[in-house]
């Protein structure tokens, strides 16, 4: 039995990864802010695998993440992989959004990722586990007027930092860097955008590698997207 915890699991990339992982035989622990959508996601997972652990929580809430890991260990007895996927965006332009939206984005994308790592790291160390972080094409190159880009650069830096911290432990760290993906963030799907299933396949590809192999970075974009 292998156990995967996913944040941002109620929609988009997180949901499709949860369903794909369940189909591949993983047991799941799902974390998301919206309790109703989280229960819908859990029902879809339960259609193909055991009922997952569900925790309705904001990833910027450290005690809630500690509780999610504790409940996962209580239910399954182990934690083999974590997909720190929760994230939100904001309009480009340093005068286009609001300070309140910026604060929410930084707390979710940066602090939330760090707190997910902090909560899960002891269990992942114990089981020589795998940490997967969602960054973005915007984390590889600065986009005009994009504070979101800065938050995703931070996620990439965290991946490198935690990889150095756990060197020699047998743990693996992968950063996923999607281009434009058709997720609920967009009111109208961008032409030619990737689908959440495209990213889910990449996550599962990283997770299914042999224990001695790490796919450190997966950069995935639509064929038509250059930046």
Image (cartoon, rainbow, N blue to C red):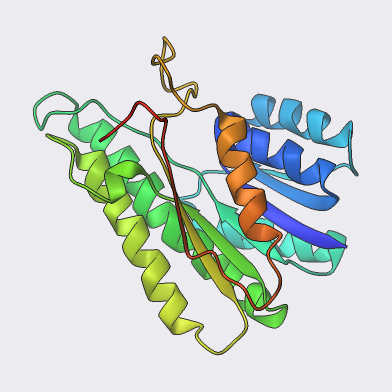
Q: Kindly tell me whether residue 202 is visible in this rendering.
A: yes
Q: Position of residue 99 (x, y in %)?
A: 19, 34
Q: Is residue 19 above or below residue 194?
A: below
Q: Quadrant of the N terminus?
A: bottom right
Residue ID at (39%, 30%): 180
Q: Quadrant of the C terminus?
A: top left
Query: From the viewer's perspective, is 160 left or right of 15?
Result: left
Residue 50's image quarter? top right
Given residues 152 and 203, the one toward you in this image is 203
Q: Outermost residue toward the front?
A: 223
Q: Residue at x 67, y 62 (%)?
A: 81
- Name above or below for residue 26 compared with residue 105: below
Whether residue 56 is visible here, answered yes or no, is no
Name the residue nearer the viewer: 68 or 44.
44
Indicate left or right for 144 with 62 as reference: left
Image coords of residue 91 (percent x, y):
23, 25
Q: In terms of depth relative to the viewer, which is nearer, 104 or 204? A: 204
Observer-nearest of 22 and 208 = 208
**Residue 150 appears at what percent x and percent y?**
22, 49
Give the quarter of the image for residue 104. Answer: top left
In the rendered image, the residue lying farthest to the top is 188
Residue drawn where x is 78% and y is 59% of the image: 3
Percent of width and height locating residue 6: 63, 49
Above or below, 69 relative to 10: below
């Amino acid at each position: 039995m292998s156990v995967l915890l996913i944040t941002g699991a109620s929609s988009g990339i997180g949901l499709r990864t949860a369903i794909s992982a369940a189909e591949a035989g993983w047991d799941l622990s799902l974390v998301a802010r919206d309790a109703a959508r989280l229960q819908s996601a859990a029902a879809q997972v339960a259609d193909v695998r055991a009922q997952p652990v569900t925790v309705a929580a904001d990833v910027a809430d450290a005690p809630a993440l500690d509780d999610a890991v504790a409940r996962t260990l209580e239910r399954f007895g182990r934690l083999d992989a974590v997909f720190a996927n929760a994230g939100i965006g904001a309009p480009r332009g340093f005068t286009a959004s609001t300070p309140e939206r910026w604060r929410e984005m930084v707390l979710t994308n940066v602090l939330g990722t760090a707190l997910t790592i902090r909560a899960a790291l002891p269990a992942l160390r114990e089981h020589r586990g795998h940490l997967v972080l969602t960054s973005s094409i915007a984390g590889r190159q600065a986009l005009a007027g994009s504070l979101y880009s800065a938050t995703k650069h931070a996620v990439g830096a965290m991946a490198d930092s935690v990889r150095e911290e756990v060197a020699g432990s047998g743990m693996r760290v992968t950063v996923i860097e999607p281009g434009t993906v058709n997720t609920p963030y967009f009111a109208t799907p961008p032409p030619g955008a990737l689908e959440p299933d495209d990213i889910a396949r990449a996550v599962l590809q990283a997770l299914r590698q042999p224990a001695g192999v790490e796919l450190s970075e997966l950069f995935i974009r639509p064929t038509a997207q250059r930046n």
